[in-house]
Image (cartoon, grey):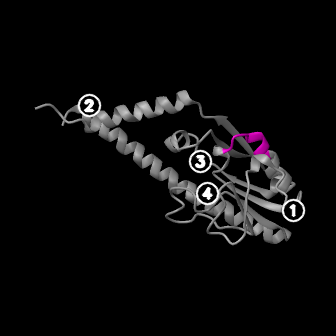
Amino acid sequence: MSLPKLAARVILGYVGLVEGTAALIRFRERSTAFQMAAERATALGRRLVVVGDPDAGMHTRLMRAYGCGDVCIDMNGCPGCPITIVADITKGPIADIADDSAVVFVSCVLEYVTDLNAALREIARLAGSPDNVFVVTVQPWTLTARLYPGARWRGTVGNASGAQAVDMKPVGLEEKLAVTGALGLALAAAFWPRRR
């Protein structure tokens, strides 16, 4: 095996390991945040609103990282959940949920919305306070954040003054093409048949 082919395979193996590890971390973050949101909803006597179908993602179809809550909101519905509101959170207000009445759990949904500010306003309206919002995002440094179909944003959720702060940046076409091209070159270098 040639040195470039070996190097390409090592790089691809490393990328696969990093992406797999990131998926496991994301699973843990989703489970932990959902549990915290459920506990807060119970303590406050509020409904737990889940934004995003718990069974819609590639990994979550294999094993759920979080539940349906009391109400699940998704553009395509949440077929596995008992109470579902089919809605786009960027087109709020969602009529069935009053202002400042819920604890809101959002799992890897903000990456796909067309209008990030509108989505954040609707989440804030439902929750009433940043303390009632629990958000998980795809790690912005992963290939998943750049290449997952339909992804428009990538970013992080951090703690600012004890409350969550969302920092998202657009994923441009140039970025998607560059990452796809680099991945394609690595795959070609790793698996291109050698000449005889």
Q: CA distance from mark 2 to mark 1?
A: 58 Å
Q: CA distance from mark 2 to mark 3?
A: 31 Å
Quadrant of residue 35 within the rendered picture: bottom right
Residue 94, position in %: x, y? 82, 55
State the CA–CA distance, disc 1 to disc 3: 27 Å
Image x and y of residue 47, in percent: 80, 67
Q: First in sequence: mark 2 or mark 3?
A: 2
Q: Marks 2 and 3: CB-CB under 8 Å?
A: no
In the rendered structure, which disc, 2 or 1, sits on the residue that comes first in sequence? 2
**Could you tell me the amino acid type at mark 1?**
Ser
- Name the N-terminal-most of marks 4 and 1: 4
Residue bearing the label numbered 1: 101
Q: Earlier in the sequence, mark 1 or mark 3?
A: 1
Q: Identify the secondary structure beneath mark 4.
A: helix
Q: Mark 4: which amino acid? A: Glu
Q: Secondary structure at mark 1?
A: loop
- Give the numbered dot on residue 4: 2
Q: Is residue 192 above or below residue 38?
A: above
Q: Is residue 116 magenta?
A: yes
At 76% from the left and 59% from the top, the residue drawn is: 104
CA gap between label 4 and label 1 equals: 24 Å
* Residue 46 sits above or below residue 166 on the image: below
